[in-house]
Image: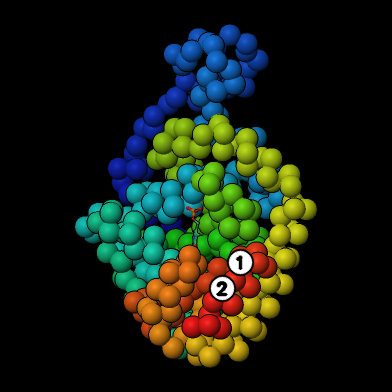
Amino acid sequence: MFDLQKLVRPNIQSLAPYSSARDEYSGHEAHVFLDANENPYGAPYNRYPDPLQRKLKDSIAQVKGIPAGSIFLGNGSDEAIDLLYRCFCRPGIDNVVAIEPTYGMYKVCADINDVEYRPVQLDDHYQMNGQKMLDTCDEHTKLIWICSPNNPTGNLMDHDEMMTVINKFEGIVVIDEAYSDFSRQRPWRLDLAHHPNLVVLNTMSKAWASAAIRLGMAFASPEIIAILNKVKYPYNVNQLTQQQAIQTLQATTDISRWVRIILEERTHMVEAFRQLPICEEVFPTDANFFLARVTDAPSIYNYLVDKGIIVRNRTRVQLCNNCLRITIGTRNENAELLGALRQY
Ligand SMILES: *Cc1c(COP(=O)(O)O)cnc(C)c1O
């Protein structure tokens, strides 16, 4: 049985969180604010922002189809990743399980928090095996990390294998859907209501074209969201970011157009890349990048750097020997990359 109260670290369970001036006052009509030691001059940035980002959450709720009470917002998804460790994993005692290879921050945050990280290798098709992940857990396993579409491999994790993990694991399953806007598969966030042990991560950094503003989201039950809110910095998402995000969330037609263009470019790029003499294999992708095995990744990487073109060399990553990860750029950028590689 999933028992959230037993999963939370005892010190977090009993924590009396910082109560900010803006937390204590709420609801009533007021026009004189002498509670937060702010400067009365210098509007609009003289006041502390809403610690719970209510207006922004209302727009996210609409766009993403998630109730506002199931949304946590952070300084990038990276904040949510770190908070999940700090809320659930006792340093030196607990552990987490994750697919391998995957996004590097899960391991970095585990190391920072002194939490054992247990990677479980994907198979030759970069696919996960749910039972193998469950077999890697013990009574101290608090979190399982699944990234789908996965970074750096680009592919979706198998739905049934993920269901095995979600249904059988008694801790928290985190599904990172940073790239789900580039996939046609139904996003997991829409099934949150059926799975009390699920946390889904989203970000403004990829499809939403806003990496610079640093806004990440965790979607989960209101009970899990309350725990994350208790531990976060009081004003973790600044006012400029909240305003800019609200604007961008209104520009859905621009965003869908860009995503459509990127997907068309991806089809074109993958086809063209497969024709290159340096290409050994392009792996299936549901993201705005693809992973390709090439003849000699380090030397091709350096050759491209000399031409001012930067891709990601993943050759040292498990199962990614001689692989480059290539982001889909504009048509011109993609053409420049292909042109350079034809002359290699
Ligand atoms: C890029 C990426 C993110 C985004 O992180 P932010 O901190 O929100 O910019 C999250 N997860 C994965 C797998 C990513 O590739």
Would residue 157 be visible to someone looking at this image?
A: no
| Circle 2 SS class | helix
Look at the numbered discs 1 and 2 and tell me whether their residues touch, using CB distance below 8 Å: yes
Would residue 87 be visible to someone looking at this image?
A: yes
Residue at left offset 60%, top offset 89%: 275
Q: Of residues 57 and 224, which is closer to you in this image?
A: 57
The residue carrying pointer 2 sits among few (fewer than 14), some (14 to 19) or many (20 or more) residues within 10 Å by Cα, namely many
* Residue 153 image offset from top left, x and y in percent: 49, 76
**Is the residue indicated by label 2 positioned so its CB lies within 8 Å of ligand 1?**
no
Q: Amino acid at mark 1?
A: Glu
The N terminus is located in which quarter?
Answer: bottom left
For disc 1, the marked residue is 333
Residue at left offset 59%, top offset 83%: 273
Q: Is residue 83 left or right of residue 341?
A: left
How is colour applied across the structure in the image?
rainbow
* Residue 6 image offset from top left, x and y in percent: 37, 53
Q: Residue furthest right?
A: 253
Say if 230 sits above or below 47 in the image: below
Q: Residue furthest left?
A: 92
Say if 123 sits above or below 220 in the image: below
Residue at left offset 52%, top offset 87%: 279
Q: Is residue 118 left or right of residue 294?
A: left
Mark carried by residue 212: none
Examine the image and state in which quarter residue 169 appears.
Answer: bottom left
* Residue 120 image offset from top left, x and y in percent: 37, 77
Say if 280 sits above or below 100 in the image: below
**Is the residue indicated by label 1 positioned so its CB lies within 8 Å of ligand 1?**
no
Q: Of residues 43 and 34, which is closer to you in this image?
A: 43
Q: Amino acid at mark 2?
A: Leu
For disc 2, the marked residue is 337
The residue carrying pointer 1 sits among few (fewer than 14), some (14 to 19) or many (20 or more) residues within 10 Å by Cα, namely few
* Residue 60 image offset from top left, x and y in percent: 66, 46
